[in-house]
Amino acid sequence: MSPTKTNTTTELMLLLMLATLWGASYTFIRIGVTTIPPITLIASRTLIAGGVLFAILLWRGLTLPRDPATWRRFLVQACLNSVIPFTLIAWAERTVDAGLATILNSTTPIFTFVLAATLLRNERVTIHKLFGIAIGLTGICFIIGVDALNGFGRQLPAQLAVVAASICYAGASLFGRNFKGLDPMMPAVGSLLCGAVILIPVSLVVDQPWTLAPSTASVGALFALAILSTALAFSIYFRLIQTLGSIGTTAQAYLRVPIGVAIGAVFLGEPLTPTAGIGLVCVIIGVMAMTMAPRRKAAQG
């Protein structure tokens, strides 16, 4: 009984850490794109993060797989989990308010649930998960506040880009289950390196990064984004995919809303809504409902 409790506690703590790392990424991106174009920011993010994780992998005495089939999966994962969504969010955050971007991106668990239930049909549809989605969205509305939706439609392309990024994340969480049996750091390293290979040539052609003069704040935000919100976060993410499942892992999208809003309030001066406390309680209940399996009745006899 105690090993199960310890394991559940550990996974939920890792889920909270992942939500914090990705919640902070909104602030890092906002600071980074002020002087670094989105494609170059994300190309640098994937290259630095992939390099850091690759060095750790070598230090641990592990080597990446060499078979083409695994690297094809790494490439698909890179497109779904970094290349497309990272770039879309970085581009969108040049115009979309942080509150609106956060609430749009928090729809990832919903898309994951819909994709898993309709296309794959291998995710159990339970009352707990349905309740978690409903109460989580309610909490997000409380946290962000009704005023955050006032801007909806004014920057429609950027807003749709954030929604598209959420769909990519949903697909990535489902596809990530193809890496069972691999050390969680393997798909993180492989997908990030694939992402860097895709994005660096695009950055060189489109942005000509040697002509840029990024600020110290943007460079610092880039390294924080790459090392904390990408390298460390991806290592945790691929572990949780294997332990909590795709729905449970993407539930961190609800947690990162209050965390992201709080970080934005402290470091960017963005105001918190009066209903944030009520929303936070709803979010925590929603995450617990989506990640904790219902207690089964003890077997008779």
Image (cartoon, rainbow, N blue to C red):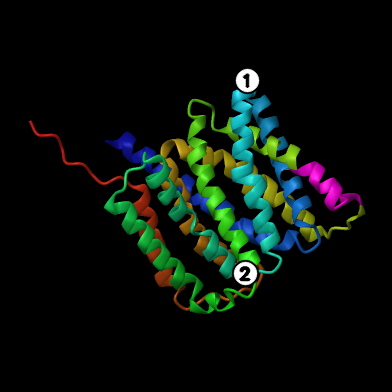
The magenta-colored residue range is 199-210
From this viewpoint, is residue 299 visible? Answer: yes
Residue annotated with mark 1: 67
Identify the residue at horizontal 50%, vertical 71% (top origin): 144
Q: Give how far across and how far down residue 208 sits, in percent.
A: 88, 51
Q: Give how far across and how far down residue 46 sits, in percent.
A: 70, 43
Q: Amino acid at mark 1?
A: Asp
Residue pushed farthest right?
Answer: 211
Residue pushed farthest left?
Answer: 301
Identify the residue at horizontal 91%, vertical 50% (top origin): 210
Q: Earlier in the sequence, mark 1 or mark 2?
A: 1
Q: Give how far across and how far down residue 65 sits, in percent.
A: 62, 22
From this viewpoint, is residue 61 visible? Answer: no
Q: Quadrant of residue 297?
A: top left
Q: Give how far across and how far down residue 160 sits, in percent.
A: 59, 63
Q: Quadrant of the C terminus?
A: top left
Magenta span: chief secondary structure:
helix
Q: Is residue 203 magenta?
A: yes
Q: Is residue 150 magenta?
A: no
Considering the numbered disc 2 on the image, is that residue within a helix, a strand or a loop?
helix
Q: Nearer the viewer, mark 1 or mark 2?
A: 2
Q: Foreground: 136 or 216?
A: 136
270 w.r.t. 83: above or below: below
Q: Is residue 290 left or right of residue 155?
A: left
Q: Amino acid at mark 2?
A: Leu
Q: Across the whole image, how many numbered discs are drawn on residues?
A: 2
Residue annotated with mark 2: 156
Q: Are there few (<14), some (14-19), or many (20+) residues within 10 Å of tag 2?
A: few
Identify the residue at horizontal 54%, vertical 43% (top origin): 172
Q: Quadrant of residue 193?
A: top right
Q: Are there few (<14), some (14-19), or many (20+) residues within 10 Å of tag 1?
A: few
How far apart are the alpha carbons under marks 1 and 2? 42 Å
